[in-house]
Amino acid sequence: MKLNKAHLVLAMMAVLATGCSSTEEEGSLTDGSQSGADASTSGYNDGSMAGSQFGSGDGYNSGSGYGSGSGSNLGPEFSDPNNPLSKQVIYFELDSSQVKQDYVPVVAAHAQYLASHPNQHVILSGHADERGSSEYNIALGEQRAKSVERMMRSQGVTTGQLEVVSYGEEKPAVSGHDESAWQLNRRVEVGYQ
């Protein structure tokens, strides 16, 4: 799927519109601006993710199932560590719902796969680390998942293929009370159904 300039502008606007400002650690909805840490739409259609990398188009490729307990049969591209589809976790900076530049190709790969497999459905589950109130972390997890959803929608994924859910701090990837644990808990998981 080729993206035109209007798609790129819309995606950039969606990414930029995801932040708010405050100062509380993982208790405010800031944009997490650090140089080089924000997402842009550059590289969405750089030719590095095309065609056969994404399977046959029927939505039910042969191969091993992938995802957190899902019974779907996804193709071998999901288990190839050199393919961005093998990454189903997008990590975020502290207090940010902005997709980091490193994960833009991952989101783009999943979006292209979903756009070419209209029968596939994913749950985008947003998570936060333990800092901040429970209510805040639920909202931040939702904003993170919606940020990924907006990027995917701007690349042709239909609303019916995407579901957003937030767990806040309730389902940590790792336990721990330091930055090494917190950075793994600030995430969105892409779960194929």
Image (cartoon, grey):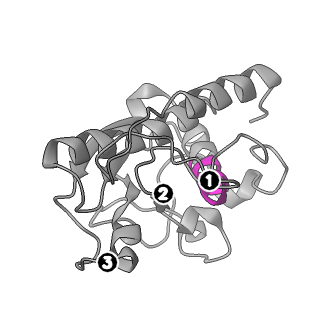
Against 172, residue 177 (above or below) is: below
Residue 6 x %, y % = 75, 19
Question: How crowded is the residue under tag 1: few (<14 C-alpha within 10 Å), some, or many (20+)?
Answer: few
Q: Is residue 29 left or right of residue 91?
A: left
Mark 3 / mark 2, whichever is N-terminal: 2
- Residue topped by disc 1: 34
Residue 16 location, quadrant: top right
- Residue topped by disc 3: 178
Circles 2, 1 touching at the beta carbon (< 8 Å): yes
Residue 98 x %, y % = 52, 44
Split into 4 quadrants, where in the image is the N terminus? top right
Q: Nearer the viewer, mark 2 or mark 1?
A: 1
Which type of secondary structure does the marked residue at label 2 adopt?
Answer: loop
Q: Which stretch is magenta? A: 101-110
Question: How crowded is the residue under tag 3: few (<14 C-alpha within 10 Å), some, or many (20+)?
Answer: few
- Which residue appears farthest toward the top when viewing the image? 6
Which type of secondary structure does the marked residue at label 1 adopt?
Answer: loop
Mark 2 / mark 1, whichever is N-terminal: 1
